[in-house]
Amino acid sequence: RIDAAIFEEITPDTNLFSLAYVGALYEGKRDIGPLFSVLRQLCDEGIIQKKKIVFHYAGGESVYLRKQAKAFGMEDIIRDHGRLSRQECLRLQASVLFLVLSTWNDRGEEGVFPGKLIEYMLIERPIIAVVDGNLAHSEVKETIQRYNLGVVYENADQETQMALYEWMKMQAMRVCGGQAVYFSPDLEAIDKNYNWVNIAKRF
């Protein structure tokens, strides 16, 4: 279970475009490169300054994350926290504006549904999901769109590539303009379908 008090006592720095990814990258199989590509584009277009972006990582595979970021000249935005306890990870995730989710949807491995997505729902921060693989219309995408939890990029769906750029541009402009990030999830539906009783029934 998650101690809700953690999220009441920690407030993100709204002057920074802050993101967090916690966990494994499966030796690079989880590829966050498309997110770094969009961040690079936003910097090049003058939408946001690189110094305003910080990407927090906690886990034991920062070498792969840095390699993915370096391909777009964005490796210096990464803050590597190494391995943290669960409570420390929750505090880190509560301290940022955006939570990053990475997974895949391949033939033979359809329907991958990370438990991290449920945790993110409870943390109540906008989610940026990057879904690798050769199949579109992943369960992760359908879930995030159904509950208005954020934005999804799917490697197999070109339309989501532009959607990621437009969504992040909108959020970057809000952050740089001193506005709150846009986040309007369907909390009532989330509670109905993902409270602990219903999670236990489902899984």
Image: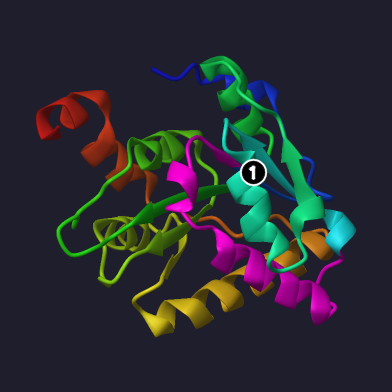
* Residue 107, horizontal then vertical, whole percent: 18, 65
Q: Is residue 24 magenta?
A: yes
Give the colouring mode of the picture.
Answer: rainbow
Please tell me whether mark 1 sits on a helix, a strand or a loop.
Answer: helix
**Front position in the image: 180 or 70:** 70
Residue closest to the far left: 201
Q: Nearer the viewer, residue 64 or 170?
A: 64
71 in magenta? no
Residue stretch in magenta: 21-49
Does residue 126 sit above or below 199 in this rendering? below
Measuring from the top left, give residue 182's x and y in whole percent. 60, 60
**Residue 60 quadrant:** top right
Quadrant in the picture for residue 1: top left
Q: Residue at x 45, y 52 (%)?
A: 30
Residue 92 lies left or right of residue 40; in this view the side is left
Q: Position of residue 123 (x, y in %)?
A: 50, 34
Query: What crowding class fits label 1: few (fewer than 14 Cα within 10 Å), some (14-19), or many (20 or more)?
Result: few
- Residue 74 position in % (x across, y down): 76, 61
Q: Residue at x 70, y 29 (%)?
A: 81
Q: Name the residue nearer the viewer: 106 or 185.
A: 106
Residue shown at 47%/37% (left/top)?
24
Residue flagged by tag 1: what amino acid is it? Val
The residue that label 1 is drawn on is 63
Query: Is residue 115 left or right of 128 when viewed as pictured?
Result: left
Position of residue 42 relative to residue 31, above or below, is below
x 49%, y 51%: residue: 28
Left or right of residue 155: residue 109: left
Q: Quadrant of the C terminus?
A: top left
